[in-house]
Amino acid sequence: MAPGAFIVFEGPEGGGKTLQAAFLADWLRAEGHEVVQCREPGGTALGERIRDVLLGRKDYAILPEAETLLLSAARAQLVRTVIQPALRQGAIVICDRFAASTLAYQGGGSGLPEEALGDIARFATNGLQPDLVILLDLPVEVGLRRRLDEAGSVNRIDLASRDFHERVRAAFRHLAADDPAHWVVIDATQPVDAVAGEVRKAVRRRLGKLQTRGHGDPPRAQPLPAATTQ
Ligand code: TMP
């Protein structure tokens, strides 16, 4: 049995994370791996309710502090009831967004302090960190245009200012640059097949390294990379 691995897709809006996560899951299953897919916020019954509260275009404001705690509640539930049990069974878990999104959106975008976000993230994730984070990067205007073109896909956060989304993108790029051993950046303006090919290459490389590391090794213990607030 292959060792469990935790792969996360991150990035600004409109980068095609959901589609690429589905392609990757199909490919890994065809290669004989057990695959569990999830998304954030969501992935559990509670998490999907929280997603609805957070992303629905409702007539109440949500402060970034409240947003962070709601996202973290969904994450705490997902990690302990879905992701960690699947990893213990040796599955590959593919998650559409994870803790780095909070550093990028609530930290980089909304300006919340990185120390507080780091503490909350460690508590919510139970210390779990991805083996590979795939950043599907693209210019903000291209991503937002894609979202606006997809009927019904625009959420409350998509409607934040252009500057907010620029800060989010910059924060993701800083996180990737600070931790090149675990992050790979892929140009998401490329055709879908080209992106899928780069994703498979990155995953193959990472799974190879995990196999060399071996089953019994302890998970890496490193602090979360700092968010950029600019
Ligand atoms: P999406 O994954 O379908 O794009 O929608 C999720 C939205 O939630 C997206 O606008 C980013 C936002 N989000 C945060 O602001 N912080 C987080 O920690 C997560 C997981 C998502």
Image (cartoon, grey):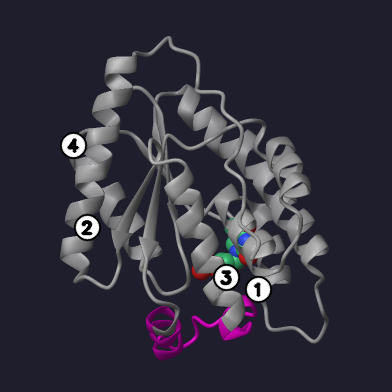
**Extreme residue in the top direction:** 216
Say which residue label 1 marks: 55
Neighbor class of circle 4 (other Cα within 10 Å; few <14, some 14-19, many 20+) is few
Q: Are marks 2 and 3 in contact (CB under 8 Å)?
A: no
Q: Quadrant of ligand 1?
A: bottom right
Say which residue label 3 marks: 167
Is residue 226 or residue 16 the one in the foreground?
A: 226
Is residue 118 or residue 1 the one in the foreground?
A: 118
Is the distance from the Cβ of mark 1 to the nearest ligand 1 atom less than 8 Å? Answer: yes
Is the distance from the Cβ of mark 3 to the nearest ligand 1 atom less than 8 Å? Answer: no
* Three-letter code, disc 1: Leu
- The residue under the point 80% across, 73% down is 62
Say which residue label 4 marks: 31
SS for callout 2: helix
The reply, left or right, for residue 163 in relation to residue 35 is right
Cα–Cα span, label 2 and label 3: 26 Å
SS for callout 1: helix
The reply, left or right, for residue 49 in relation to residue 134 is right
